[in-house]
Each structure stands twice: as C-alpha cells, then as structure tokens.
C-alpha cells in the first residue's frame, strides 16, 4: 500500500485536449504535433535525471534492472537508457535544451553518443539540433566529428570497425527469425551492394504479374547469398568511391562514398591496392549516360553517375544501393533514358510518385532534385480538384 501511495504522489500528468483531431484545422493540428514533441523532450529530460540519480546511488547494473521493471523495456534498451543518461550528464547545453523542450530526444541522444566517441563542439550541435530534421542533423554530427578529428577521420573509422556486431534471434512476438548487424560505412556499403545487386537479379527473373514486394525480394536475396553462395553469388559488388583530383599537388583529395560519407586518405590508399580504379567523367554527354530511346533500364554507368549526383533517394535519402532509377518524364510518354531525365528513388518513394501523385522538382539554384507531395485536395481555403491517378502495382527500374 505504501508503494502505491508513493507511485500516486509522483504520477506524471499531462493535459491532453479532448477535441477530436479530425475537427481541428490543419494549422492547429500541426501546432499540436509540435507541442507533443516539446512535451516528449521535457519528459525525456526528467527521465534522464531520474536514471542518473538511480545510477549514482545504486550502480549501473541495478539501475538497468529497475528500468526493465519500471519502463517495461528490454535488457538492451535498459542498458542504452543508462549509457545515454550517463553521457548526457556531462553535456550541460544539450541537457538544458532537452529539458526546455527545444531539441527532440533523439537529437540529444545523438549528441550524447557522439560525445562518447570523440571531441565535439556541443554548443554548435545543440543549436543545430533546434532547427534540423534528424537525418540532416545526423549528417551535421558526422561532419563535425571528422572536422574535429586530428587524423583525417581514421580514428572514427577504426572505432566504427571495433563496434561492429551482428546477431540472429527468434522474435518472441511472432516466431520470425531476425538478423541484425552494424558495420563501418565501407563494409556496410559493400554488403548493401551485394544484397541490392542480387535483389535486382531476382527482380529481372520474376513474372511481372506475380511480383514479390521489395522487402520480400531483399529477404530472398540475402538468404540466397548466405545459403547458396555459389548460385547466389552477386554478379557485381564494386564499391563506388568518389575523390577530387588536386591538380596542384597531383593527388586525390576529399575521398568519400557516393552518399557523402568521408573516407580517410589512408583507407583510400588501401582500397586502391585491393580494388580496380575506374576513372569516370560524368560531365560530358557520353553515349553511356545519354541513351535516348535505345534502352529503357538505366545502365550501371548511369546508376553510378546518379549515385554521385543524388547521393541517395531524392525523397528520403535512402542509400543508393536500395534505390531505383526513375524517369522524370515517363518512358511510356516518350521519356528518354538520359541522365538529366533520371533520378534515384527508393521503392516507397517510387510508389509515392506513381500511385499518389508526388512530383520530382529541381531546384534552379542548386540543381538538386527532390520530391514534392501533391496539392492538398482539401485546402483550408479554396478548392483543389486534384485526385491521385489509378494505382500502378508494377514499377520498372
């Protein structure tokens, strides 16, 4: 009874409006979502204080047990909560911004994780976290880590290699087996290329009327590569590495993967010893990149050029290995298989284009492509006659 009384005394309460969200205006609904984000951040800050107090008094192991009971989380999540709270305890600016609701919880966790890996400029990151979406902020953190490292980012890559891990377990929820793995960017991109190349091979062999989902095809590709290494061998796993050429010093510089992930120059030299060097010039209108109506499916050379230009899905930044080449002006409407008529999109964003009326737009100042949603069919004022086109279940790559 005493425990129940203590629980009631410290019960956290929130005032949630009783109005139906469907009756709210669009502006009010979006403002409400922003308030939810701030409330979640403030709760996360309070939870961090509680965890740190428990850890200081009882130790990490005991605190993990407490969290598993109080928060009803897994052993892995409890450990992550304790580690993150410990890292945040030394980040005053981040903690203040979190408790005031200025930055989301995941942004604060990312700053805490980066601080445990090496030097960071906390004030700069805490300010950026107030304005940048998570994906953009993650890139900001990685870029700062590399700029502040005194060894061209080699120690960051070495740390990522040391933290590699993989696991296989049976889900308690539905009995499915789950494979998970974390790798450094170079190894991870090689794995992604092997799986995506095999997935495209399976797509080409499929009956167009009985296609698997992209997720099913990806699972089958991974299974074949592991269980049938001879028949399941991927035809191409060449890693695309981009580097600038310093004409003054006659050497390569600013090496990076196609998604922009930087590569230390020492690692680039090692890759050059282990792999073929394939120089490419993507500015000239060569026959390989401007095919007109000769071919519908993008070539490997075009995919490489698209990876260099788009750096991933133009809608959600998905890795280029998981993307498809989409014709901006559809092939069926006379569109050409030319580099300036192609963009990289993942399967989900590809369906957004074909099924829900999303459009490819090019920024006139930067030349970057992005995806824009269709006009609001029910705007706050005025009338819009837009209706999505008929759904198209088959997408050609």
Image (tube, rainbow, N blue to C red):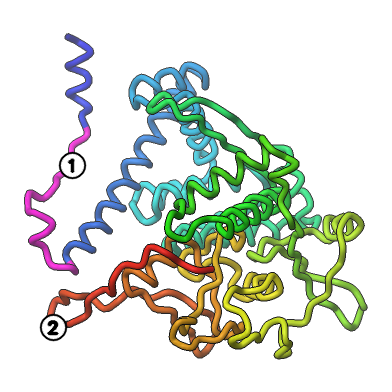
- SS for dot 2: loop
The residue singled out by tag 1 in the image is 14
Residue most toward the top? 1
Give 311 or 160, whichever is nearer the viewer.
Answer: 311
What label sits on residue 383 in the rendered view? 2
Q: Residue at x 27, y 48 (%)?
A: 39
Q: Residue at x 68, y 47 (%)?
A: 118
Instruction: Give me the C-alpha separation between circle 1 and circle 2.
Output: 37 Å
Is 304 placed left or right of 354 in the picture? Answer: right
Residue 290 in view in this figure: yes
- Asked if residue 15 lies in the magenta stretch, the reply is yes
Mark 2: give few (<14), some (14-19) or many (20+) Cα within 10 Å. Answer: few
Is 147 placed left or right of 171 in the picture? Answer: right
Q: Is residue 164 above or below residue 97?
A: above
Pick the quarter of the image with the N terminus: top left
Boundaries of the magenta span? 12-27
Q: Residue at x 76, y 65 (%)?
A: 241
The picture places residue 84, in percent across and down from the top left corner, at 51, 37
Instruction: Say which quarter of the image contains residue 116.
Output: top right
Instruction: Say which quarter of the image contains residue 261.
Output: bottom right
Give 254 or 226, whichever is nearer the viewer.
Answer: 226
């Amino acid at each position: 009874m005493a425990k129940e009384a203590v629980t009631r005394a410290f019960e956290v309460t929130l005032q949630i409006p009783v109005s139906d969200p469907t009756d709210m205006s669009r502006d009010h609904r979006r403002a409400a979502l922003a308030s939810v984000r701030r409330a979640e951040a403030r709760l996360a800050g309070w939870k961090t204080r509680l965890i740190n107090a428990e850890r200081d008094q009882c130790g990490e192991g005991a605190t993990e047990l407490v969290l598993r009971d109080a928060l009803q989380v897994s052993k892995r999540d409890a450990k992550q909560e304790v580690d993150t709270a410990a890292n945040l305890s030394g980040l005053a600016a981040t903690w203040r911004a979190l408790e005031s609701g200025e930055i989301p919880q995941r942004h604060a966790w990312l700053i805490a994780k980066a601080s445990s890996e090496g030097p960071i400029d906390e004030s700069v990151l805490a300010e950026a976290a107030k304005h940048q979406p998570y994906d953009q902020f993650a890139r900001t953190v990685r870029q700062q880590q590399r700029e502040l490292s005194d060894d061209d980012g080699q120690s960051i890559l070495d740390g990522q290699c040391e933290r590699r891990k993989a696991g296989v377990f049976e889900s308690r929820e539905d009995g499915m087996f789950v494979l998970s793995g974390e790798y450094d960017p170079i190894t991870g991109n090689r794995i992604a290329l092997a799986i995506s190349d095999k997935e495209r091979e399976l797509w080409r062999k499929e009956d167009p009327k009985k296609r698997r989902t992209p997720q099913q095809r990806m699972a089958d590709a991974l299974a074949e590569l592991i269980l049938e290494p001879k028949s399941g061998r991927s035809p191409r796993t060449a890693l695309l590495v981009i580097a600038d050429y310093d004409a003054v010093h006659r050497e390569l510089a600013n090496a990076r993967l196609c998604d922009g992930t930087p590569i230390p120059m020492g690692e680039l030299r090692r890759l050059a010893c282990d792999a073929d060097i394939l120089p490419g010039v993507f500015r000239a209108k060569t026959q390989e990149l401007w095919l007109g109506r000769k071919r519908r499916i993008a070539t490997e050379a075009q995919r490489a050029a698209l990876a260099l230009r788009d750096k991933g899905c133009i809608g959600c930044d998905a890795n280029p290995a998981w993307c498809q080449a989409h014709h901006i002006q559809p092939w069926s409407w006379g569109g050409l298989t030319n580099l300036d008529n192609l963009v990289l999109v993942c399967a989900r964003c590809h369906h957004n284009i074909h099924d829900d009326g999303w459009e490819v737009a090019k920024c006139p100042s930067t030349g970057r492509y992005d995806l824009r949603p269709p006009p609001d069919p029910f705007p706050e004022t005025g009338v819009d006659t837009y209706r999505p086109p008929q759904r198209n279940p088959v997408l050609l790559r």
